[in-house]
Amino acid sequence: MRHLLSIEQLSKAEIEAILDRAESFAEVGRRDIKKVPTLRGRTIVTLFYESSTRTSSSFELAAKRLSADLVSVKAAGSSVDKGESLKDTIATLSAYDPAAIVLRHPYAGAAQMVAGWANVAVVNAGDGKHEHPSQALLDVYTLRRRLGSLEGKRIWIVGDVLHSRVARSNLIAFKAMGAELTVCGPPALIPRGLEQLGCTVEHSLDGAGEADVIYALRLQHERMAESFVPSIREYAEHFQIDSRRLGPRQLLMHPGPVNRGVELSGEVIDSPQSLINEQVASGLVVRMAILYELLAAGHEEPAPVTGNGHATPIGQPA
Amino acid sequence: MSATQLEMRAGESADLVLRGVEVLDPVAGIEAQHDVVVRNGEIAELLAAGEAKADGLEEIDAGGLHAFPAFFDPHVHLRTPGQEHKEDIETGARSAAAGGYCGILAMANTEPPVSTPADIEALLVDARAAAAVKVGFLATVTRAMEGVELTEMASLRAAGAAGFSDDGLPIRSARILRRALQYQRLCGGTIALHEEDPELSGAGVMHEGPVSAALGLEGIPSISESTMIARDAALAGYEGGRIHVQHLSAAESVEAVRAAKAAGVQISCEASPHHLCLTDEEVRSLDPQRFKMNPPLRSEADRQALIEGLRDGTIECIATDHAPHAAEEKEVPFEQAAMGVIGLETAFAALYTELVLPGTIELGLLVERLAGGAAPFGVERPSLTPGSEANIALCDLSARWTVGAEGYESRSSNSWCAGKELTGRVLMTLAGGRIAYRLRSFSMGVAG
């Protein structure tokens, strides 16, 4: 694996290899000294163009646990604020000769473009509404630990699928692991043609009793102003997961941050069925495993997509 | 009523003979091998192969090559004034000549937009100085393309405007378009329409469907285009106006134009080579350089509907919507990238490779539709009948070439064909009776 740009690029076996590696890092996490020397002397850059708590902190901690040198760049307060293009920013950061760049960007395909410009392993930490592969991997990891296998398990993804990169990556990942997927939400928040990704589409939670896992998504308040839904109250009435709707043997997940009282009621967040805090803990070991697979496994240097070692111009497209 | 004015730079009239060339002019009903004699920039004679006398003419051994009436593109962007770093009249016309075109019409969405008679006059002067092919200029329908007030359409027409268009933007207000159609009775000039409902398109960047769902990109639904065509066809019918619908992309749009034609509306339309050859599946690459444009690439069913429209005459012409952009506007993530691709240099070869060689359409239909954009704007269709001005595209249908390998005549390189190997190449173009283009490697050997 050269880069982690999307879940779509991964086979089931590759997903499992990362999860197995994460298991071994979980063991490290139970020791007194939680640090391993694997990436000593190598540099990892995290470059976040969007705000993030979980993803940025867990990638940063993962890099430190692997003994890498870490450079964290946030778009706010950096030269990005001064209008520097992504390509020029990457060229600048490439001068430090990093082993990996972890990129969060508001637009689809940004990580893929960076992979074409710089001789460095690129991790997509979320690109627009497209993909969020490390989130999907940590969610599969969390479920695998709880359920053993996802084969034949019924998973409902509920809420604002249209604006969710998590929904897209998780749909692909859960399906790859053998689960049966249903997507549920108000019609305007389900993208047209989504069923062709191999899921069932529902606009009511009536059938959600069949689910082994309910994966709720965040509803952003501005969706109401754009008339995707008439009101938060009516959304919650139809799509909120609360203790009436969540069965005792069903598991509940959410990528965070949660809008309490909107997509989830307070009591289910803190219920024994909730895996939300486990997801965060899984995030650390899975992101350690991702960095390890990219930078240490097989001792392969990521091969350049183009050029001579530093960010090179694309020039004429191939 | 005033007429469309086309200008090109002065030059020597062509005097040459194309020996033994396969002549195909489907409109004139010519399909045979001839010696084509061009004298003083006119097609003097079509003689049986080998019968033309040298007579001081340049002789070109054109055995195995094809001569078509040169093409005419009613929809290109020359980015002048204001964005000459993308294209100018000289480079755009050169790009057209390299694609076998003898004439092009430039859109008015420049910086500032072409909205005054002085703008039109200045551009025609520039074309007279720099253009290798005939260039005409449309003026905007509304001042500064703001969609609020009409331009001085009659004065613009008198200055030589080829027609009117706010291309790049739809005319939101039905009332304003209605006024323009009413005023058209006074001044003539076809109104060319970029059909899109901005409310439905929103911030969309590609076709709405399974591919946009998979990529998480905001979609532009097909009905954004077709509902506006239906509205504007109804307005044109009501006012007796003449409209030309630009860059059809969706099956529903072909149906809307077909219905309007059946109802007797004076409506013509165009489709682009990229919409005829590609679908939204290409967008999975997330490559905006080649695959981001407006209207967007749509589904295979839409592409098939466009081909059917081309066959049955609903779509009378192919227009490239040649839209040059600087590299830095395309080397950004898909959603941020500028919309548009260049197409003049590859239109014939791409369509020959993708549609004619597999047997989807006949060569004659392609040649006819590539010049079909002249008539809707009151320009005479290029012809190979003796007595016509020499407007000829000389093509080698067996030549294979890789697009972009030798660069582009255009100032920009955002070609949707970049890196593709195409079959069929324009070797020489005659425009307005002059030699507008010769492929560098095509040596002009003396026949025999």
Image: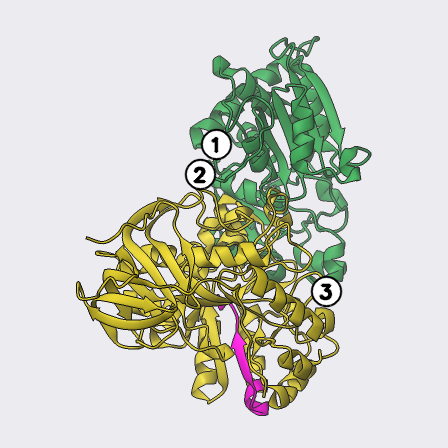
Chain colours: A green, B yellow
- Point out the residue furthest to the right here: A77
Q: Which residue is drawn at 70% across and 60% down?
A: B111
- Is residue A155 rendered to the left or right of residue B126? left
Which quadrant would the N terminus of chain B be assigned to in this image? bottom right
In the rendered structure, which amino acid carries the disc numbered 1? Ser
Q: Where is residue A91 in the image (x, y as percent from the top left)?
A: 65, 28
Chain hosting mark 2: A
Q: Which of marks 2 and 1 is in front?
A: 2
Query: Which is more N-terminal, label 3 or label 1?
Result: 1
- What residue is shown with label 3? A230
In the rendered structure, which amino acid carries the disc numbered 3? Pro
Bin the neighbour count of mark 3 within 10 Å (Cα to Cα): few under 14, some 14-19, many 20 and up. few
Residue B239 covered by magenta stretch? yes
Instruction: Please give the range of residues in magenta.
Output: B236-250
Q: Position of residue B405 (x, y in %)?
A: 42, 40
Q: Nearer the viewer, mark 1 or mark 3?
A: 3
- What residue is shown with label 1? A149
